[in-house]
Each structure stands twice: as C-alpha cells, then as structure tokens.
Image (spheres, rainbow, N blue to C red):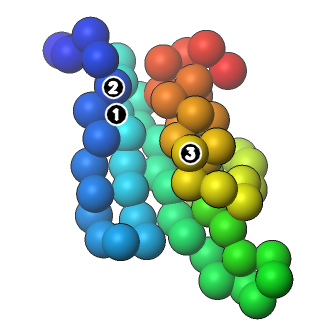
Amino acid sequence: MSMKPIWTKESPHRYAVEHSGRRVDLHYEEAGFQSGWAVYTGETLVRRCAELMQARGVAVALASGDA
C-alpha cells in the first residue's frame, strides 16, 4: 500500500484520490454561478468547493484520515 495519496483523473470533470484503502471522489458540478467541485465519500456529499485546489485539499485530508 502506498504511503502517498494516489490521484486518478477519470475525466476533465472527475478525479479520485485513494490512500490507506479510502477513496474520495471529486466531481465538477455545473450550476450556473454556483458551479464548483463537490467532494464525495461513496455516495455522501462531504463538501462543495469553488476551486479545484481547495477540493483537492479536502479530499486528501479525508482520504488520509486527517479530517
């Protein structure tokens, strides 16, 4: 098992990160001026973020067990 989070780009609007057996997904959701990145663990929405880098930080913390 890797000691670092592993990122996978599934499409330009979908990414996933895996670490220590945990998987967290990022989906870009278009909604006009409220468009942004949604962070999911399984089917559960954890948080919405306006920027990809912010969403990546949330996803890594969740996958690493730091959140």
Return the residue at label 3.
Answer: 53
Q: Which residue appears at 55% of the width and 16% of the height?
A: 65
In the rendered image, the vertical position of residue 39 relative to residue 3, given as above or below: below
Nearer the observer, disc 2 or disc 1? 2
Q: Can the viewer see residue 40? A: no
Q: Earlier in the sequence, mark 2 or mark 1?
A: 2
Q: Secondary structure at mark 3?
A: helix
In the rendered image, the vertical position of residue 3 relative to residue 10, given as above or below: above
| Quadrant in the rendering for residue 52 | bottom right
Q: Quadrant of the C terminus?
A: top right
Return the residue at label 2.
Answer: 5
Q: Position of residue 53 (x, y in %)?
A: 56, 45
Labelled pair 2, 1 in contact (Cβ < 8 Å): yes
Q: Secondary structure at mark 1?
A: strand
Q: Position of residue 22 (x, y in %)?
A: 41, 29
Q: Secondary structure at mark 2?
A: loop
Nearer the observer, disc 3 or disc 1? 3
Residue 18: numbered disc: 1
Q: Which residue appears at 26% of the width and 49% of the height?
A: 8
Residue type for callout 1:
Glu
Q: Earlier in the sequence, mark 2 or mark 3?
A: 2
The count of marks equals 3
Residue at the farthest left position: 1
Q: For the residues marked 3 and 1, what is the alpha-carbon distance in whole angstroms?
A: 16 Å
Labelled pair 2, 3 in contact (Cβ < 8 Å): no
Residue type for callout 2:
Pro
